Amino acid sequence: MPLFTQPNSGTIGVDVSDHVLRAVYAVPWRKGLAIKRFAQVPLQPGIVVDGAILDPAEAAKAVHSLLGHRLPFHSKALVVGLPELHSFVGSTQQQRDSLEEEVLRHIPFAEEEVTIDSIHYDRNVIGFAAVKTDIAQTYWNVFSSLGTHVRALEVESQALARLYIPQAIAGQSTILADIGQNHSTFLVVQDDHIDLTHTSKLISGNMLTSSIMRRLNLDGPTAERVKIDQPTHPEVQEAFREHVVSIGQELERVINFHYSHPSDPQPTSYRLLVTGGGAQIPDLVQRLEQSVGMPVYRAAIPQNIHLPRALLHNSHSFATAIGLAARSIEK
């Protein structure tokens, strides 16, 4: 189950979440990538929970339905995303013979539960990805059972870093906050590698919706509509404020952890990029800048990724799938 192997040109990136499967078919375009086709299919509750495939048979049916949406999966390589809740991505300058010991200091899993893959970067930095073995094996089995050519499994964080942070800024670390429906992931990128990842279920779009439900005594679907349609409502504004405070507190923990595990060279400053469905609240960038005291930007698809017009206004939902497919142009 390779985590770093490069696919050939013409790649399908597949993103698996608890409630939907998404895929894009991408081909090389100029000095970048063109998304030629994309598709998504919903998942029934219970098939995938917290990123773990609990019902492989039903998951395989959904994948077959997804790939049947005009995606040429029989002849093209697939890169499949692995869940952040069951993985950790980071880097170290430790020698390879002590890599496993270094990795195990960071992950909340027992040694016998994980698969670790690594890659050498410049300056003798070793990047690593650690994933729970049973999770990765189930993903591999589901996709392989359909006769697909699974070129690589990759942690979602790796795909997002590739997409949104294609170039490093000297002396500065970039923190990407992916605020999802069920959880959020913070990844710290320095130079050409991910220094660390951190995933939390305490910050999510669902948590924000739950806050609005409590404040206005609403059911879930109504609260979700109010969040979108009535963002200036005083109680919704207060829920937004709490959401931003929570993001800021989690960000502080990530930075403190980063400082306690020094990299080389040490970053002189940080910038924050935000993405994900839970990051679409009004004025989030301005609210966060006031809260965290660092430059904050909305993550944007780089110009060397050509999107079809129908995907332009929903690109953040397909970001992981696009980042997975972008392995085909990574140097």
Image: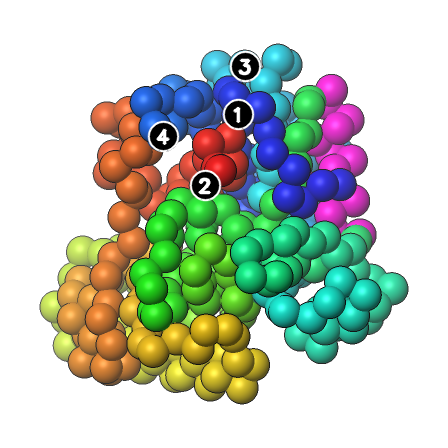
CB within 8 Å, label 3 to label 2: no
Q: Give the range drawn in magenta.
A: 134-147
Location of residue 81 by image quarter: top right
Residue where numbered disc 1 is placed: 11
Residue that label 3 marks: 72
Is there a contact, CB below 8 Å, between mark 3 and mark 4?
A: no
As shown in the figure, which amino acid type bears the numbered disc 1? Answer: Thr
Disc marking residue 32: 4
Secondary element at image label 1:
strand
Residue type at mark 2?
A: Gly
Q: What is the C-alpha distance between the residues marked 1 and 3?
A: 9 Å
Residue at horizontal 52%, vertical 67%? 195
Residue in the foreground of this view, choosing between 167 and 152: 167
Do residues under tags 1 and 3 come within 8 Å of each other at their CB atoms? no
Please report whichever mark, 1 or 3, sits nearer to the chain's N-terminal start: 1
Give the colouring mode of the picture.
Answer: rainbow
3D distance between C-alphas at marks 1 and 4: 13 Å
- Front residue (pair 24, 68): 24
